[in-house]
Structures are given as C-alpha cells and as structure tokens.
Image: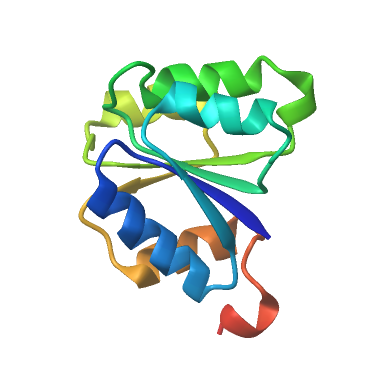
Amino acid sequence: MRALVIDDSRAMRRIVSGTLEGFGFETRQAGHGQEALDVLHEGWVPELCTIDWNMPVMDGLQFVSAVRSNPGWRAVTLMMVTSEGEHGQIVRALAAGAHEYVIKPFTADAIRDKIALLGLLPQEMAL
C-alpha cells in the first residue's frame, strides 16, 4: 500500500510517515498541495493521501477538490490530518470529497483506527 503525506511541516510529515510506515505503507511526502499533485501526475498514485489544511501554494481543501475532479484518481482515499477542528471546516472537507478527518494532535492509535475504518489497514494490524 502507498501513502502520500502532505503537510508543510517537515516534522509533521516525518511523524505521519513514520506512523503509516509502521502499518506497512510505502510513503512519499509533499510540502503542499501542488507538490502532491505533481507526484500524482508523475504516476505515483497512492491508496491514501493524508492532507494538512493550511499550506502555502495550494491548501488541503484545494488539493482535495483537484483530486476529486480527476476521474483517474477517484479511487484515492483522502484523509485530512489537520489542526482545523471547527465543525464547519470538517463538513466542508467531507463535502469536497475527503473520506475521513483527524484533528492534530493525534495518536498513532487514532490514525490506525481511521485507516482501519477506511479498509486500508492490513487485517493482522486491525486487532
């Protein structure tokens, strides 16, 4: 399984990538939405993208909308991982096409539970 970790914070990218790699994902990282789109256009299409909301160049919501507008990327699961916890913003992200939403700070267990809910966690790790 592949995961693309999109966050403007290098430290947060390392934390999320490390967590996902612990669950068996092969990860790549991007510092903003446009960089992430460039990765997808190169042909490296993951099963999961974790997306921060507030980033320069292209924010998380713009990235979600761009991915959802491309029929070739419809199978990509999009999970917001952000400090934006206001109900209205969660609704906006889900309406734009995100599948799940994790609010920072989070635990590895919270990430595991969300990816298990999305059907992306290997069966032996879901216990």
Q: Does the image show residue 96? A: no
Q: Does the image show residue 32? A: yes
Query: Whole-percent x and y of residue 39?
Result: 59, 33
Q: Residue at x 23, y 34 (%)?
A: 84
Q: How many numbered circles are shown?
A: 0
Query: Whole-percent x and y of residue 117?
Result: 57, 60
> Is the residue 8 above or below the residue 117 in the image?
above
Q: Residue at x 57, y 17 (%)?
A: 66
Q: Is residue 60 left or right of residue 100?
A: left
Decide which of 62, 30 is in the foreground and name it: 30
Query: Whole-percent x and y of residue 41?
Result: 67, 25
Q: Is residue 126 left or right of residue 8?
A: right
> Is the residue 127 above or below the residue 70 in the image?
below
Placement of the N terminus among the 4 image quadrants: bottom right
> Is the residue 71 above or below the residue 2 in the image?
above
> Is the residue 25 above or below the residue 28 in the image?
below
Query: Whole-percent x and y of residue 44?
Result: 69, 41
The quarter of the picture where residue 76 lies is: top right
Q: Residue at x 54, y 60 (%)?
A: 115
Decide which of 9, 126 is in the foreground and name it: 9
Q: Residue at x 44, y 25 (%)?
A: 33
Decide which of 110, 26 is in the foreground and name it: 26
Identity of the residue furthest to the right in this view:
72
The colour scheme of the drawn protein is rainbow
Placement of the C terminus among the 4 image quadrants: bottom right
Q: Is residue 64 left or right of residue 101?
A: right
